[in-house]
Amino acid sequence: MESDFTVAIYDELDKQLSLKPLKTYNLPFVLRRTWYDELSKRSFEELVRHNHPAQAEEWLTKLEQQHKLLGYIHVHDLLRGKANEAYFEICESAIGNRYHQVLRLEGLTIDGGHGNWLSGKDSINGRLKARKLNCWISEQQSGRLNAMLHLPPLFAIYPLHATLANGKYSKCSIAFGLDAFLLESIDKKIRWIRSRSGNTAFIY
């Protein structure tokens, strides 16, 4: 799943510590935990070449091998205290009431945090919107899902805003990749066990 949301970051904190500041990270984590700005590929490469002329070409060549990079982020500092809100967005009509099953969706974007975003097809959201991703969506928010399905910490469930035509949105949850398939399996199993035991099934 993480390969769908991998971004290259230039970390000012590592630069100050004389560590290699160029690395790849999971985008939702970066948005929640850092102060950042999105950069174009050209601006990112210029930043690396300006600050690290001796190592720049080697580092950037290795970065080019990451074929599914979603974009480029300049991290200025870690966020102190409460994490930023970061959430995915999609039109509710794209979901079509197909909750609690694995879907292959196109048109997702991501927002939140304290950063500046670029626009256009070569931006992070431009690339993300064009990707078709396997996902699983629930109308429930992640905290309630964890309690209902007794999920271990390994599951990555993210907030999702399902936007309506009038600009309002419903707060939902979304998981991707292997997590999506596992959640579909767990959800079906729990429904079956409850129906066999005579208990009230979950109502969504």
Image (spheres, rainbow, N blue to C red):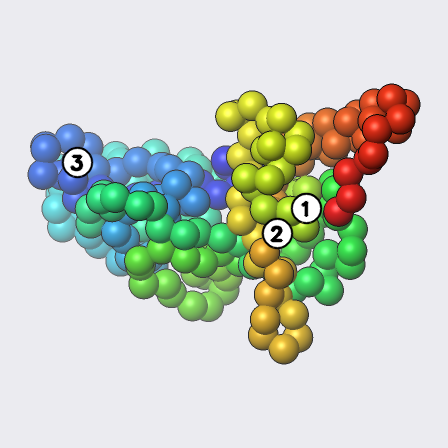
**Dot 1 crowding, Cα within 10 Å, few <14, some 14–19, many 20+:** many
Q: Which residue matches tag 3?
A: 14
The residue lying at 31 percent from left, 59 percent from top is: 115
Label whose residue precedes the other's in the sequence (3 or 1): 3
CB under 8 Å between callouts 3 and 1? no
Q: Which residue matches tag 2?
A: 172
- Residue 60 lies, with reference to residue 31, above or below; the image says above
- Residue 117 lies, with reference to residue 149, above or below; the image says below
Disc 2 residue type? Answer: Cys
Which SS class for mark 3? helix
Which SS class for mark 2? strand
* Camera-side residue of 80 and 197: 197
Q: Position of residue 64 (x, y in %)?
A: 39, 40
Q: Which residue matches tag 1?
A: 138
Which SS class for mark 1? strand
Q: Is residue 74 left or right of residue 162?
A: left
**Dot 3 crowding, Cα within 10 Å, few <14, some 14–19, many 20+:** some
- The quarter of the picture where residue 174 lies is top right
* Camera-side residue of 133 and 181: 181
The residue lying at 26 percent from left, 38 percent from top is: 22
Q: Position of residue 100 (x, y in %)?
A: 75, 42
* Camera-side residue of 85 and 51: 85
Disc 1 residue type? Answer: Ser
**Dot 2 crowding, Cα within 10 Å, few <14, some 14–19, many 20+:** many
Label whose residue precedes the other's in the sequence (2 or 1): 1
Q: Which label lies toward us, 3 or 1?
A: 1
Q: Position of residue 103 (x, y in %)?
A: 74, 45
Disc 3 residue type? Answer: Asp
- The quarter of the picture where residue 202 lies is top right
Label whose residue precedes the other's in the sequence (2 or 3): 3
Question: Is residue 64 visible from the viewing direction of this image?
Answer: no
